[in-house]
Image (cartoon, rainbow, N blue to C red):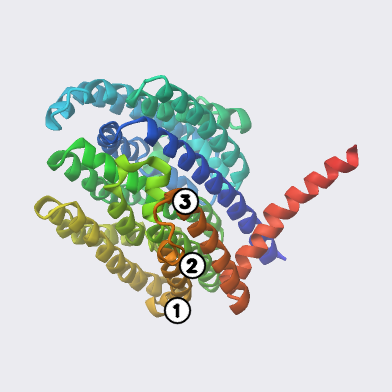
Amino acid sequence: MEDKQFKGKLIHGISWAFIQQIITYLTVFIFGVILARLISPEEFGLVGIVGIFLGILPLFVDGGFANALKQRRTCTDEDFSTVFYFNLAMSIFLYLILFLSAKYIANFFNNEKLILITQVLGVNLILSSLASIQNVILSRRLDFKLIAKATVIAQIVSGIIAVTGAYFGLGIWALVLRTIIQSLLITVLLFTFNEWKPKFIFNLNILIELFPYGSKLFLGRLISVLFKNAFIFVIGKFYSPTQLGYYTRANNFSQLPSQNLTMIVQKVAFPAFSQIQDDKIKMLAVNRKMMKLLMFISSVLMIGLAASSEAFVISLIGEKWRPSIIYLQILSFALLLYPAHSININILNVLGRSDLSLKLVVIKNILMIPVIYAGIEFGIIWMLLGMVIYSIAVFFINGIWANKLINYSVIKQLSDIIPSLIIALIVGIIIFYTPLIFKISDNSLITLFLQVSLGFLLTIFIGEIVKYKPYMELKEILIIYIFKPVRNKIFSKKNEY
């Protein structure tokens, strides 16, 4: 009975996280496409430069304490309130530093426009810190329905405002508005939907208790984010803002499928698996299921994106973005294994082995140095190819430690992943040659529609023919948690009339 309850709670959490990420994917994608048509690659590049700092500083705001709360078996209002006030104080302090440093940032990247952009976008640090503990509390309850509602509403509203602003000529400020309004709305909605409010309590001893675990996570994430943002830093410093714009647009598109799947693992698996961390057999079984399911989705989406990237870019954001096609193709393969990376790292964190997680981060980012050097010395394409090789190497490194902790060896992981890769490659090769077969390469929109439709139908056909288990499980989840509830609501409303 207890196993069934846990499974139901986990699937329910995954389903809502999945719904949120799908809607997030669609809203970010749709608004991103519209904005890319209205705003120049150079302006996207400038926002990407400021994004380096907005990607790093939030880690210092949190200090790893939020994840430490997620991992803790029991938490009180005193715990939540203490971390809330710490995050708020740190966000204000770091914003002031960023505000005063804006001129030096602009001088370093040789662009005075960055001064005001940095100072305004920096406000996002404070806004996002206010929502941090609300996310922790809801994640611990596996209440991703509330998180999904707040996030989706905020993304739609901020997207509409940004597109309106871009249409009336706000340019880069439309992108700035979108970021700030989205964070503001998420914070307001989470405080509206969730009953928890911070108490006037601050206990330094709680931070001291959380520090040993949280600090290791913080250092690990900091090193990862520093190296991740190093690509943007290298392109922003050694190449033009326009080239950075091509890269950031391709990177954003490629991250939508892989990052959304990874977010599901991080949001649901971490708090859920913390409840069964003492049962290694159950941990192994659940992780294998998640690996098969998420890597099936990732393989189909990422390889499909690489195969249809030319029609995808030209039809949606126009010829001015053509140089980003090759970036998108390579990045799709570089990010293919990200859900697998996330599952393996999650195993370490759930079991409280943040020390191992930190060691792995150090090892992996040492391997990143040649990749960054390739970008400086040989060009962006060589750096991206290095990212593909790096991702494969990281998979094997992570798998070694997953094997030691829950007996999930690299061989087992490959056996769980390879069938999905084979299916995705078959589908990808077919849709890649679709324009040549049907001789429609001149019309990119029709080509994209045909490639997406054909890829979707082929995936279903192969899944049904071979009764591929991850496909069948995904189909079951969609039917039970999405299609049936929607159908029941429609028919219940009809019966009311």
What's the CA distance linking mark 2 and mark 3? 15 Å
Under tag 3, what secondary structure?
Answer: helix
Q: Which amino acid does label 1 sit on?
A: Ser
Q: Which of 154 and 203 is in front in this view?
A: 154
Q: Residue at x 39, y 41 (%)?
A: 317
The local crowd at label 1, few if under 14, some if 14 to 19, many if 20 or more residues have their Cα within 10 Å, is few
The local crowd at label 3, few if under 14, some if 14 to 19, many if 20 or more residues have their Cα within 10 Å, is many
Q: Residue 415 carries which label?
A: 1
Under tag 2, what secondary structure?
Answer: helix
Q: What residue type is labelled 2?
A: Met
Q: Where is residue 382 in the image (x, y as percent from the top left)?
A: 18, 58
Q: Which amino acid does label 3 sit on?
A: Asn
* Image quarter in which the N terminus is found: bottom right
Residue hosting label 2: 291
The local crowd at label 2, few if under 14, some if 14 to 19, many if 20 or more residues have their Cα within 10 Å, is many
Closer to viewer: mark 2 or mark 3: 3
Height in image: 457 above or below 113?
below
Q: Where is residue 336 in the image (x, y as percent from the top left)?
A: 38, 62
Q: Residue at x 49, y 37 (%)?
A: 133
Under tag 1, what secondary structure?
Answer: helix
State which quadrant residue 346 falls in: bottom left
Residue hosting label 3: 260
Height in image: 22 above or below 121?
below
Give the mark nearer the N terminus: 2 vs 3.
3
* Image quarter in which the C terminus is found: top right
Q: Which of 193 and 158 is in front in this view?
A: 158
Q: Nearer the viewer, residue 244 or 292?
A: 244
Q: Which residue is drawn at 43% across and 74% down?
A: 413
Give the mark nearer the N terminus: 3 vs 1.
3
Q: Which of 112 and 245 is in front in this view?
A: 245
Q: Where is residue 431 in the image (x, y as percent from the top left)?
A: 45, 64
